[in-house]
Image: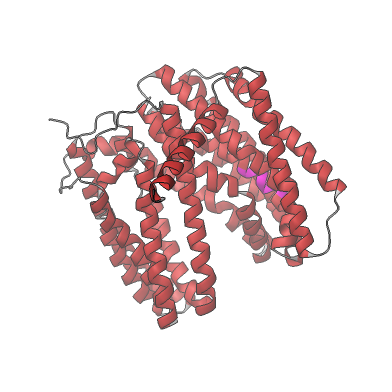
């Protein structure tokens, strides 16, 4: 069968590593934009709607989200991994996406009476029907946009995704002003998802057709990912359920708030850059030397970005909680210390997951994940039983270190990566972090925490900026003294310069001559 090129790859002199780094920057920017728009709309909606409105919508959305995760077979990831996917693969993935949307809609509607009874609110049934319809229509999203990732066109992917989020905000907020009803939230969800689906046919020239001819090819790649999705659900929720069962609702609140703050580097930096890294590793999958190089580059870049931020949050836990959450959350300070370390080690372990997938070791991935859960779940249960939420979080930190090592030793040797390779590329980051930590601790002792909020904000800002500057200066100094070897520093600097040049050219075009 003749291959159908969807979006021609642009000939460029930029290396694969630079393409990955540039894509990572766009994906982080996308996550920041989503956070900003979500915060902006939330601050407005909190003034217009009541907690019950958020509660019933959140309940149905939670059920839909669980179904989405459990039914996600990652067909797009399969296409990205294929060196030369054909039209039949795209069409089959699109058709299966439609069928998945229909199946989820049926399940949400079937579960709606149970959800309504759970919260004693019949409105849940009507909301379930609305969200089921949205799920069906969203399934028609154009599969052609997957080529934005295959060809590293993450700037186009960025604009396409932000458009949908903007549409949701522009619909949801006016609807809340007009109706003061929970239907404003549904309108915003519909606008986001349906506008994104509609825009996919504008930004991509590909026109999918109904077909199931290549379902075997896609399922052969994705069948193990269905099992791993169940494992992800267990891993993501075991801490909340066990802590709540053993230590009560207040402990859940302390943990969730602490973890949300402490895991920001992992969730807003490490997680989004794994997407362009997966695309890069997929392109290099058939060249073991290139795969090894790209894996090391990605690992070094992840550590260079996430490690100083995570350690910085851990060191600044006390002023962060005191300034932004108030005295009621003072018990969360030690949890922020611990959760920052947990998120850091976990993000390093999660980095290896793409390597398992692109090397077709999904079965080994599921097996390693099973061992990781077999260690983590009992550790959390015992920690919560004897020491409450603090013991459970200590168990999380300990198992995150164990899991990081477990994930790594089961895949890195398969692509020719040794401990020496990792140590040579990460010692500069660790050196920079140690110097930064010394500077932050020294400055914190020198400048005691003031009682007023403005003075506290000034102190926190100065210490954070100083710590960041010290880290960057010390790591770049170590890099230059080593002769500027290939690594995260070079990719980040070159990508930043490239984006700065492009932004400068775009700005100059807007200025009249």
Residue sitting at the far left: 1
What residue lies at 76% left-to-right and 64% top-to-bottom?
A: 453
Which sits in the foreground, 53 or 121? 53
| Most frequent secondary structure within the magenta stretch | helix
Residue 394 in view in this figure: no
156 versus 455 height, above or below: above
Q: Where does residue 48 sit, x and y in percent of width and height?
A: 50, 79
Relative to 336, is 63 on the left or the right?
left
Relative to 224, is 98 on the left or the right?
left
Q: Where does residue 380 sit, x and y in percent of width and height?
A: 64, 48
Residue 259 in view in this figure: yes
Relative to 1, is 392 on the left or the right?
right
In the rendered view, how is the structure colored? secondary structure
Instruction: Quadrant for residue 145, please give it.
Output: top left
Q: Would you say residue 338 sits in the magenta stretch?
A: yes
Q: Where does residue 406 sit, x and y in percent of width and height?
A: 57, 31
Q: Residues in magenta? A: 337-343
Q: Where does residue 295 sit, x and y in percent of width and height?
A: 48, 27
Q: Would you say residue 386 sits in the magenta stretch?
A: no
Q: How many marks?
A: 0
């Amino acid at each position: 069968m003749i291959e159908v090129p969807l979006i021609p790859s642009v000939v460029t002199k930029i290396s694969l590593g630079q393409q990955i780094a540039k894509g990572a920057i766009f994906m982080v920017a996308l996550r920041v934009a989503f956070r900003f728009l979500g915060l902006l709309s939330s601050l407005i909606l909190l003034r217009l709607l009541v907690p019950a409105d958020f509660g019933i919508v959140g309940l149905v959305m939670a059920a839909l989200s669980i179904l989405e995760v459990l039914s996600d077979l990652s067909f797009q990831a399969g296409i990205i991994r294929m060196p030369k996917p054909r039209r039949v693969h795209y069409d089959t993935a699109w058709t299966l996406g439609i069928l998945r949307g229909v199946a989820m809609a049926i399940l949400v509607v079937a579960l709606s009476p149970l959800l309504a009874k759970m919260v004693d609110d019949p409105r849940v049934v009507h909301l379930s029907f609305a969200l089921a319809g949205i799920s069906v229509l969203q399934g028609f999203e154009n599969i052609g946009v997957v080529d934005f990732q295959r060809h590293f066109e993450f700037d186009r992917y960025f604009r396409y995704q932000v458009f949908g989020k903007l549409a949701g905000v522009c619909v949801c907020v006016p609807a809340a002003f007009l109706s003061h009803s929970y239907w404003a939230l549904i309108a915003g969800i519909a606008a986001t998802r349906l506008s994104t689906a509609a825009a996919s046919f504008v930004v991509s020239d590909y026109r999918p057709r109904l077909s199931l001819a290549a379902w075997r090819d896609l399922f052969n790649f994705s069948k193990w990912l269905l099992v791993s999705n169940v494992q992800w659900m267990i891993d993501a929720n075991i801490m909340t359920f066990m802590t709540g069962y053993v230590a009560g609702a207040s402990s859940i609140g302390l943990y969730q708030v602490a973890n949300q703050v402490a895991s920001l580097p992992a969730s807003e930096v490490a997680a989004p850059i794994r997407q362009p890294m997966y695309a890069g590793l997929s392109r290099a999958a058939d060249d073991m030397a290139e795969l090894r190089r790209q894996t090391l580059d990605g690992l070094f870049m992840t550590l260079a970005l996430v490690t100083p931020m995570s350690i910085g949050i851990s060191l600044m836990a006390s002023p962060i909680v005191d300034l932004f959450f108030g005295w009621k959350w003072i018990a969360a300070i030690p949890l922020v210390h611990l959760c920052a370390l947990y998120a850091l080690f976990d993000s390093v372990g999660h980095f290896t997951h793409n390597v398992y997938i692109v090397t077709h070791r999904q079965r080994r991935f599921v097996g390693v994940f099973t061992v990781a859960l077999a260690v983590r779940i009992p550790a959390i249960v015992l920690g919560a039983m004897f020491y409450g939420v603090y013991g459970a979080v200590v168990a999380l930190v300990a198992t995150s270190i164990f899991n990081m090592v477990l994930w790594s030793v089961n895949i890195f040797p398969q692509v020719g990566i040794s401990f020496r390779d990792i140590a040579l590329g990460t010692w500069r980051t660790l050196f920079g972090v140690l110097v930064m930590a010394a500077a932050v601790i020294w400055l914190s002792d020198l400048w005691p925490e003031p009682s007023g909020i403005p003075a506290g904000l000034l102190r926190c800002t100065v210490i954070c900026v100083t710590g960041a500057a010290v880290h960057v200066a010390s790591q770049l100094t170590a890099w230059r003294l080593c002769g500027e070897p290939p690594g995260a520093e070079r990719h980040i600097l070159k990508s930043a310069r490239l984006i700065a040049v492009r932004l400068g050219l775009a700005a100059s075009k807007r200025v009249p001559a």
